[in-house]
Amino acid sequence: MGFYTDVVLPFFYDTSMDSAKINEGRQSILNKITEDEILEIGFGTGINIKFYPENVKKIIGLDVNEGMLKQFNKKKLKNGIEIQSIHQDGEQLPFPEDTICGVTSTYTLCSIKNIESALSEIYRVLKPGGRYYFLEHGLADNLKTQKWQHRLNPIQKVWAGGCNLNRDIKSLINNAGFNFIELNNYYMKRDPKIVGYMYEGIAVK
Ligand SMILES: C[S@@+](CC[C@H](N)C(=O)[O-])C[C@H]1O[C@@H](n2cnc3c(N)ncnc32)[C@H](O)[C@@H]1O
């Protein structure tokens, strides 16, 4: 951790990732949540809060970067929703198995170091039948773009807080034991293809 990670990145994410284009995807997936309590992995600066439907009464927002949570704490909260923010690595979730009703993550699986551990932790803590709602970018659907994603990945990781361009999100979620209820893949309009291939869906334990 340092000034860049603690202060610059939280400010950068909070401004650049709260855009109409990105928020369309947030709204699309978070609107489908049926649970009243949700664990959000990679809570960041809390941009998602405004997109949770009214049935969600409590969010446990977990993030490894305390600077993100500090940036979130400066915000005014939506009434009627309880937020518990936790400074914790998502690779080790502080909950017993089979206890969490629903999990979300948006733009987070790209930057967790040990992604397999984090996904198996999400699977472990979810109740049987519990849902994981995700909106993530990752490995594209064509070889030409994939080649560039692999090439540019080391550079992207340095400047973008450990973000990987080339993770196969579908296989990773599947390998953790989940089944998909829904999975939509698409390119974000006007984004370079290397960062804009999306995985939006719901997986179930
Ligand atoms: C690109 S930001 C996205 C933030 C937020 N989910 C959003 O959509 O605006 C990625 C977030 O994942 C968090 N993160 C990275 N590795 C993590 C880990 N191992 N455990 C928990 N959070 C992590 C980062 O600190 C950061 O807040």
Image: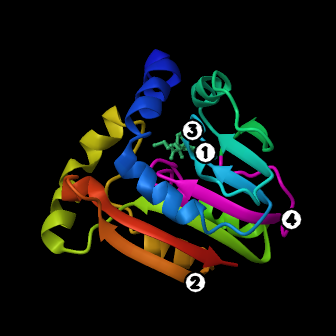
Residue occupied by mark 2: 181
Cβ of mark 3 under 8 Å from ligand 1: the answer is yes
SS for callout 3: loop
Dots 2, 4 in contact, CB < 8 A: no
Residue 61 lies within the magenta run: no
Horizontally, residue 88 falls left or right of residue 146, namely right
SS for callout 2: strand
Specify start and end residues of the magenta stretch as a single range: 90-117
Q: Amino acid at mark 1?
A: Lys
Residue in the foreground of this view, choosing between 31 and 97: 31
* Quadrant containing ligand 1: top right
Residue drawn at point x = 72 percent, y = 69 percent: 34
Query: What mark, if any, has residue 44 been given in the picture?
Result: 3
Magenta stretch secondary structure, dominant = loop
Query: What mark, if any, has residue 99 been given in the picture?
Result: 4
- CA–CA distance between discs 2 and 1? 24 Å
